[in-house]
Amino acid sequence: MNKNNKLQEFTPLFEPKTVAVIGASAKGGALPNHFIRRIREFGYSGDIYPIHPSAADIDGLPAYKTLADTPLPVDYAYIAVAGAQIPDMLTAAKGHVRFAQVISSGFGEVDEGKELQDQLVAAARAGGMRLIGPNCLGIFTPRGGVTFAEVGPQETGGVGVVSQSGGLGTDIVRRGLGRGVKFSGLITVGNCADVTPTELLEYYFADAQTKVIGMYIETAKDGRRMFEMLRAQKAAKPVVILKGGRTQQGLLAAASHTGSLAGDDRVWMALSKQTGCVMVDTLDQFIDTLLLFQSLTPKTAQPTQRVTLFGNGGGASVLATDYFAKLDLDVTPFDATTIAALAELKLPPGTSITNPVDCPVGTLQQDDGRVAEKILDIIYASGKPDALVMHLNMSAFVGRSKPEVLDNLVAAALRVQEKYPGQAHFVLVLRSDGEPALEQRKREFRARAVALGVPVYDEMSNAGHALAALKLHERFVWTRSTESL
Amino acid sequence: MNPQELIARARAQQRTALDERAGKSLLTEYGVAVPRSVTVKNAGEVDAAFAKLNPPLVVKIMSPDILHKSDAGGVKIGLKSAAGVKDAINAMAASPKIKGARIDGYLIEEMAPAGQEIVIGGLRDPQFGPLVMVGLGGIFVEVLADVSFRICPITRLDAEEMLAELKGAAILAGARGRKPASRAAIVDALLKIGGDNGLLMQHAEDISEADINPLMVSESGAVAVDARFILR
């Protein structure tokens, strides 16, 4: 019931039929003018209503004096003008606006703006709308055709994000897209004066398009509600949390041992343990993990534990084995049957076939790279790992192999993983030294792989962290699915 | 006295915390075992009290002015006779650190059987509400901060995971020739404190911090030897 309410309530925000813009200048050049241009370029097809006290038109669009004057009611208003003017503008909307996102700052994030923020919230109530922000950057919603970030048209995907920071929201969109992340939406919420991150999480849980939910959060004013909601959801979708300002420090004025031992960090760790949310520490890990959940379907009946590593680079394999062990992922040798099957291939000396499967370039370029298909076949069919990480040190092929060897290796990888659907989680690591020609090829490989649902990482450690997050989610669902609350 | 009355009385007396006896009454209401005890006003009441208890006994000062009883010389353990209890009370009353304090009386308690010291704590987080904590007693908590927190209410599985998460968890199984401590008894106490209808959830509006330190855990059960509840 409640679930459908949030879906219904927030759909006009993510798919607005009408957008009002406050703060665009008749002369152009202001941030809201860029916003109008960006959403037009992004493919926004609904009505755009610039609001301006005197101009007749802005950027070729007829302008209206107040939010109450637009031809159709406003689903989404983007507001970036001096903060003190905004409360009156919201009050004037008189129920004509569903959502107002206030980009402007100078509100509750500074002491002298706290009162103005209270006025803003009261005005939004009086005007009959929900308020997003203030002190944020906007919304990025490919299905709604709206973007605050400077990016070309994008297809809708399964990653839904809430970010308390606007700047970081831009990073997540732009870097995420570069890595192949496809968003169901990303919204920056700033001070969260009215609409809370919890409500948006609820929307993403209810939204059929969203497969995995990400959140960057600094302060959870409604932490209790967030906990209760996440607990009730029982990780029905994976949730990845990047928490800013996690401190170890306990209460400054604690009167008890307990008080002095409790840091913000401990609370968020507790939240993760009790709700199955994955906590990550860096922006890279955040994107790595979202990409993984976008690409792979969690196997909650058999949580990931046994991992096979296959690729070139002996030292890299050894280091990765150690690192994965630290993350509580097992890279343990195959059974005798699998080793015997791999031995049948009679790979050249220097090849290790026990797991990690370590193949020097000389081995991998056999049959112009098609050998990989045979090796992968045996790993899938006989080794049966929970996850398979194939890693290619692209630099090692330079000057030794025909260019098509790498193409064939990647093609073999993508072909074989399709042959065994629903078996091992397949992850590709493409390592390079940053040389421009190699980076270009890596981009091409990545695009091909991600399109087929294979997440691609730059290093083994990145892949390891993402797989550890997958394992945590799978384990939580596995152990908690039968628990009654 | 029911829990609400215990808290109301402390507030009426302008106290910022429940005294030890009230704290233990609160624990009893939620099914957490505490040692048998009698409170006396002075040494003159000891004989009647002694007859009701099984030695060895411990005497503790009760004063709103003394937060750290041991540091002030307000705890004396291992007393086997009524005379020993009287001497302890007279010595406390005369000690320099206690002399000027308001004294509510003296708590005479049976000593809990030896066991593993555990700490269970509570805390009201401004954003997330009541939290519950568990750790092994002594240096594990005080030096190593080897504790585990959860947001209330916790489930049985949460409580079990809290214990498993402690770095010193192996000690509960009885490391280095020590007797094992009952994990079931700790889980049970955690649920009574931090569970769905537990103490911290029921009194979330009243309790800002809590320390049950130590909870003495043997092979078969757990007894709360000391308890502090700081009021909001």
Image (cartoon, rainbow, N blue to C red):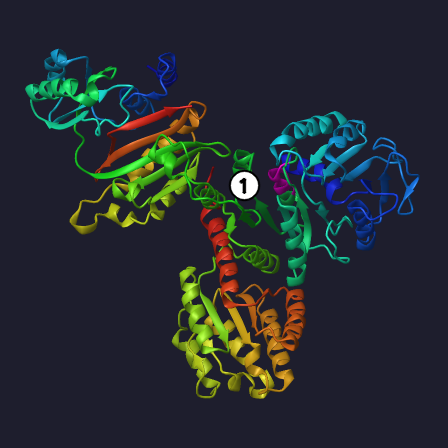
Give residue B117's quadrant in the image: top left
Q: Main secondary structure of the magenta part?
A: helix
In the image, the segment drawn in magenta is A196-203
Q: Nearer the viewer, residue A151 or A117?
A: A117
Q: Residues within 10 Å of mark 1 (few under 14, many from 20)?
A: many
Instruction: State the image coordinates of residue B116 (x, y, percent, origin top left).
Output: 22, 40
Q: Name the side, left or right, on which A463 lies relative to A158.
A: left
Q: Position of residue B166 (x, y in %)?
A: 33, 47
Q: Residue at x 67, y 73 (%)?
A: A440
Q: Is residue A249 left or right of residue B146?
A: right
Residue type (three-letter) at the residue carrying disc 1: Leu
Query: At x 25% / y 26%, what residue is drawn?
Result: B34
Whether residue B114 sits left or right of residue A97 in the image: it is left
- Above or below residue B33? Residue A170 is below
Residue A436 located within the stretch drawn in magenta? no
Compared with residue B2, is residue B164 higher up or lower down, i.e. above or below? below
User: Is residue A158 something that shows in the picture?
Assistant: no
Residue A299: image location, x then y, percent: 52, 57
Which residue does the image show at 62% across and 52% down from the upper left? A211
| Figure quadrant of residue B140 | top left
The image shows residue A238 at horizontal and vertical percentages of: 56, 50
Closer to us: B18 or A119: A119
- Considering the image in quadrants, where does the N terminus of chain A appear? top right
Q: Secondary structure at mark 1?
A: helix
Where is A401 relative to B218, above or below?
Answer: below
Check disc 1 and report the residue beneath it.
A230
Q: Chain of mark 1?
A: A
Q: Residue at x 65, y 49 (%)?
A: A167
- Extreme residue in the right direction: A56
Answer yes or no: is residue A42 visible.
yes
